[in-house]
């Protein structure tokens, strides 16, 4: 609201490369249970003015306070049935099928945050309607989307 196309640039979406997915699923986590790959498809929204970025992020936090920086309990933690029911009950962005589940400062912003400076890059994770289920080898996972905002 109030932004024109000159105020931002949209890049993407791109699908997570197979090597990165393999690394995330097998190397980094060694997981073999159902979990969420929160950035299977990623896009970037570049905001040209810091004050507009602050406004966008604070409005998102105001509309969806339950997703602000919280660890989202996925199916590996609470079970598949409880996870799907939880997602079903979550609030959608009005007039869309987008179900936000996490908004947090990108890990690249740790130094800024430690220095009491505001983060300039955020990860906004969401489902588009029903979470998609995928099986890769013996690993089960749900995939979601990520919009990096900065």
Image: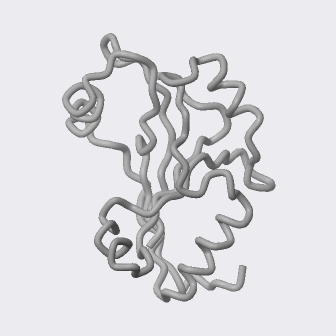
* Left or right of 35 on screen, residue 85: right
Residue 63 on image: x %, y %: 74, 62
Residue reaching furthest to the top: 138
Residue at 34% over, 68% down: 109
Above or below — where is 139 with respect to 130?
A: above
Above or below — where is 120 with respect to 36?
A: below
* Left or right of 88 on screen, residue 80: left
Residue reaching furthest to the right: 95
Residue at 25% over, 23% down: 30
* Left or right of 136 on screen, residue 91: right
Above or below — where is 148 with respect to 2?
A: above
Quick one: 21 or 85, which is closer to the camera?
Answer: 85
Quick one: 16 or 148, which is closer to the camera?
Answer: 148
Residue at 20% over, 36% down: 19
Residue 20 on image: x %, y %: 24, 39
- Where is the C terminus found, in terms of image quarters? bottom left
- Where is the N terminus found, in terms of image quarters? bottom right
Residue 136 on image: x %, y %: 34, 19
Residue 141 on image: x %, y %: 44, 24
Quick one: 43 or 119, which is closer to the camera?
Answer: 119
Q: Quadrant of residue 105?
A: bottom left
Above or below — where is 125 with respect to 62?
A: above
């Amino acid at each position: 609201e109030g932004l024109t196309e000159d105020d931002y640039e949209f890049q993407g979406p791109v699908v997570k490369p197979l090597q990165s997915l393999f690394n995330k699923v097998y190397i980094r986590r060694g997981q073999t249970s159902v979990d969420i790959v929160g950035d299977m498809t990623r896009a970037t929204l570049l905001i040209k003015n810091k004050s507009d970025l602050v406004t966008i992020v604070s409005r998102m936090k105001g509309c969806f306070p339950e997703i602000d920086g919280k660890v989202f309990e996925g199916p590996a933690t609470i079970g598949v049935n409880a996870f799907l029911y939880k997602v079903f009950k979550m609030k959608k962005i009005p007039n869309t099928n987008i179900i936000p589940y996490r908004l947090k400062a990108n890990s690249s912003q740790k130094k800024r945050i430690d220095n009491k400076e505001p983060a300039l890059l955020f990860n906004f994770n969401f489902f588009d309607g029903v979470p998609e289920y995928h099986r890769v080898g013996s690993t089960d996972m749900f995939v979601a989307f990520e919009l990096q905002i900065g």
